Amino acid sequence: MPGALVLTAHGDDMEFFAGGTIALLCERGWDVDVLIATDNSRGTFELSTEQMFGLRLKEADAAAQVLGVRSVSCLDYPDGFLCETPHTTLRGQFMDAIRRHRPGIVFTWDPWAPYENHPDHRAVSWAAMEAASFAHFPLYYPEQLAGGLEPYYVPEVWYFAKNPVDVNKRVALSDAAIQKKIDALCCYDSQMVLTLRDHQIAIESAPYDVPRITGLDPHDYRAYIDHTVRRGALRAGREAGMEYAEQFRRTRWGGTERQAPDGTIPPDPV
């Protein structure tokens, strides 16, 4: 059975944008591994950097259990400062993970998505895209080959569609899959408190109020997260006649599917 590799910046990135899809793949027997680049240490209005560092894998491992993910690992670069890590260093670490896991699909941020304000997302997107594009070239990071890895061609890359530009793949989510997505997100207690409080702060700066949001205790976030996730999935599904969906910009086989004989492309896994 093929596997998938998620290359992302923070714990909860994947769950927000692909959690339902990952749940479906795991349900169908895929091995899914997640590599998180940063330590999540600044995603809070309440805790210290040290407290956040201690939670980085605890929350991610709990979410992985909900979704059925095989493994989660973390490179522990400082949250918010990934742009200070040499690009080629991060690219090499992602390429090492690709050559080690040999995934059928890589999931990651999209380097061409517009309006991305987070420097960590931008850093991951370019490094992951290049790693997936050149992992089959033996003269990229030859020390990895000397250490026993082999070049590997990544068949498919599915980019998170944070802003739905050039979406060409939608995955219909079952009720069970969307519930797992919500449950997995709620394993990131620190991040869901942050998500709700950040939204409240934005509204508090505006010349209006939204009491159903600003009146919430940030620690009582579950109904808010449930509503937010379902609203986004309904919007994505509406575009394709589905109830709930997640959406991606997908590249496959270097674009050669345009030349494939009729009937030779296998059905999508989800």
Image (cartoon, rainbow, N blue to C red):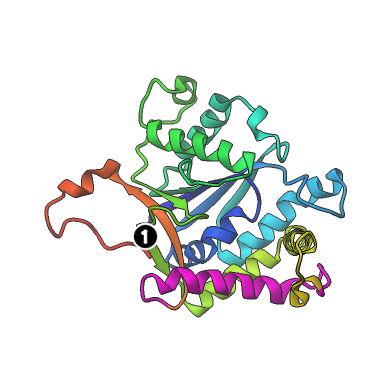
- Percent x, y of residue 48: 87, 47
Question: Residue 59, relative to residue 126: is it above or below?
Answer: below
Q: Is residue 216 left or right of residue 228?
A: right
Q: Residue at x 36, y 26 (%)?
A: 137
| Quadrant holding the C terminus | bottom left
Question: Residue 112, relative to residue 91: is it above or below?
Answer: below
| Quadrant holding the N terminus | bottom left
State the residue lying farthest toward the left.
Answer: 261
Q: Residue at x 61, y 60 (%)?
A: 64
Q: Could you tell me the amino acid type at mark 1?
A: Lys
The reply to whether the magenta stretch includes residue 218 is yes
| Span shown in magenta | 215-242
Q: Secondary structure at mark 1?
A: strand
* Mark 1 burial class by Cα count in 10 Å: few <14, some 14-19, many 20+: some
Q: Is residue 157 left or right of residue 63?
A: left
- Percent x, y of residue 150: 40, 31
- Front residue (pair 59, 203): 203
Q: Is residue 104 left or right of residue 226?
A: left
Question: Residue 202, relative to residue 158: is it above or below?
Answer: below
Q: Count every numbered label the image shows and give the total.
A: 1
Q: Quadrant of residue 189?
A: bottom right
- Percent x, y of residue 201: 79, 60
Q: Is residue 240 left or right of residue 217?
A: left
**Chief secondary structure of the magenta span?**
helix
**Label 1, on which residue?**
169
- Percent x, y of residue 159: 45, 50
Q: Residue at x 72, y 40 (%)?
A: 79
Q: Quadrant of residue 77?
A: top right
The reply to whether the magenta stretch includes residue 224 is yes
